[in-house]
Amino acid sequence: MVELSWFVFLLVLTFPFSVSKEGQNLLYLIYDDYSLQSSIGILSQSCILPCSFQFTSDSLIHWIYPITQNSSIHSYYHNKDQLGHQNQSFQNRTSLFLDQLSRGNASLLLKEVKIQDEGRYKCYTSSSRGQQDSFIRLKVEAIFVFAAPVSDIRIHQDGNRITCSSEGIYPQPELTWSTEPPSNTALQNRTTVHQTEEKLYDISSSLTGPDGPDLIYSCSIRTRRNQKTATSRSQSRKSFYHLMQSLDHHSQSCVLPCSDSSSSDVIINWSRLTPADGTVHCYYGNQDQLGQQDQNFRGRMSLFTDQISRGNASLLLTGVKVQDEGTYRCNTSGNKLVFI
């Protein structure tokens, strides 16, 4: 069975569930938080809000958000969807797994997740067997596969004033200035942060270059996921030129998920299909086999060896680079192929 996954998994989540809908393989993860289920939604992706119930032919399902306004985002009764009173912001973005209702699955598929969707949801179900309320908390994250949340920095000069800016960032970024060699004069700058209607952040900062010898000015913009730096060199108070240099400090790691059903003689072969075919990581004979490993991944790939016996064939990639973007294949001795 081929499983598709388009986002980075957060390690705090512990229970993965796979649900097939209309030929798609969708993955959602939940965890218990003081009896309140939580679901992680990825910005602009789809996510599943889990809910189960005892099905009968007269079953009724109401999904409510926000709870304080008792606003319906999806209803089902009389054996069909009832969307006449659906909250407009959720139109064409919600659906139930109709073929699985008889098995007690009242989970809701939410498409094109927005920051505004974050919050507490209620799943109300009722039938001749009784009624129940289930509450799910949705947390939205802006996580992009092999791409830095800070994607581009613009730095330019007007007279002796230098301005640095970037747009479309999430979560809220921080901006710092520095010079090389370090300046004895404190850098006086003015930084503004603006949140767009899409709940993303634009940031801009400007400072006036002080008198003195030539300096290299560095503007760094960072979030908790990555940092980018752009530089500009001052040749005099009124003359600057750009180094056209952008340094991306990828301190984060990511996990490429894969599982294996083999109980013994485990073989795991990770390979990269695009943009170029190559071996990424191999494991057999109860140890890593890296003789044919692509040099670009040397020292950056590792399995969770203490979890292989429990079926975890996921691969940890450290020091993520933009060049790592592509399609990866996990082939295991359990005859399972996973494309990521």
Image (cartoon, rainbow, N blue to C red):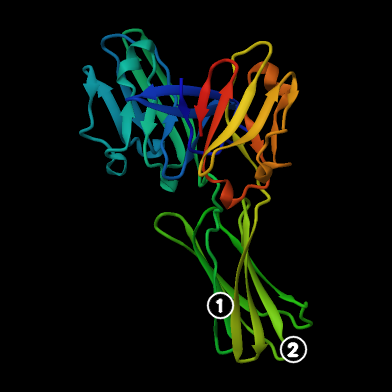
Q: Which residue is mark 2?
A: 213
Q: Quadrant of residue 126?
A: top left
Q: Amino acid at mark 1?
A: Thr
Of residues 37 and 183, the one nearer the viewer is 183
At 41% from the left edge and 54% from the top edge, which residue is drawn? 198
Can residue 272 be seen at all in this image of the molecule? yes
At 58% from the left edge and 81% from the top edge, which residue is drawn? 162
- Mark 2 surroundings within 10 Å by alpha-carbon count, few (fewer than 14), some (14 through 19), many (20 or more): few
Residue 247 x/y as whole percent: 64, 63
Up-down: is 208 above or below 128? below
Of residues 155 and 323, the one nearer the viewer is 323
Q: Which residue is mark 1?
A: 163
In the image, is 28 to the left or to the right of 187?
left
Residue 142 x/y as whole percent: 51, 47
Up-down: is 298 above or below 183? above
- Mark 1 surroundings within 10 Å by alpha-carbon count, few (fewer than 14), some (14 through 19), many (20 or more): some
At 54% from the left edge and 50% from the top edge, which residue is drawn? 147
Q: Earlier in the sequence, mark 2 or mark 1?
A: 1
Can residue 193 be seen at all in this image of the molecule? no
At 74% from the left edge and 89% from the top edge, which residue is drawn? 213
Q: Amino acid at mark 2?
A: Pro
In the image, is 25 to the left or to the right of 250?
left
Instruction: Determine contact: label 2, label 1, CB under 8 Å.
Output: no
